[in-house]
Image (spheres, helix red, strand yellow):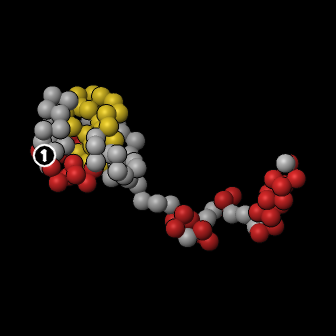
Amino acid sequence: MTRVFCSIYKSSKKDEMYLYVPKASGLKQVPEALLSVFGTPRHVTDLMLSPERPLARADIAQVLEKLAGEGFYLQMPPPPEPWIVNPDNAPAWRRQTVEEVQEQQDGKGDAS
């Protein structure tokens, strides 16, 4: 499969989860069990996919393969940044000292 005109849908239940389907067949080939977990599909855009045009967060070859074989491709959300799960691992520019937090809170109180 060299080129596919596809529709991309966003999940109503999970942030940053997307479903790619061929525009011609729509959501017909997506299993009902997947749709129940995905939620109401919200159309985002239509896009011509080709091996020459890479995608930002998915391997274009894998997307085209899944569209040809299964009739859909599910793009899962990226894993959370480690510093969100454990703030002690945050990059230096993301960390604040207790004093900086206190200064921000004090500054807000003075402005009112």
What residue does disc 1 label? 70
54 lies left or right of 95: left
Q: Secondary structure at mark 1?
A: loop
Relative image position of residue 93 (x, y in whole percent): 69, 58
| Image quadrant in which the N terminus is located | top left
Q: Position of residue 109 (x, y in %)?
A: 83, 55
In this view of the protein, which residue sits in the foreground, 10 or 88? 10
47 vs 100, left or right, is: left
The residue shown at (46%, 60%) is 80
Q: How many marks?
A: 1
Image quarter for residue 19?
A: top left
User: What residue is at 12 percent from the left and 42 percent from the top?
Assistant: 29
Residue 31: x and y in percent read 14, 49
Q: Residues within 10 Å of mark 1 (few under 14, many from 20)?
A: few
Residue 4: quadrant of the picture = top left
Residue at left offset 34%, top offset 41%: 10
Of the residues shown, which amino acid type is indicated by label 1? Glu
In the rendered view, does 75 fall on the left or right side of 86? left
Q: Nearer the viewer, residue 107 or 78?
A: 107
The answer to whether residue 90 shows anywhere in this view is yes
Residue 68 in sight here: no
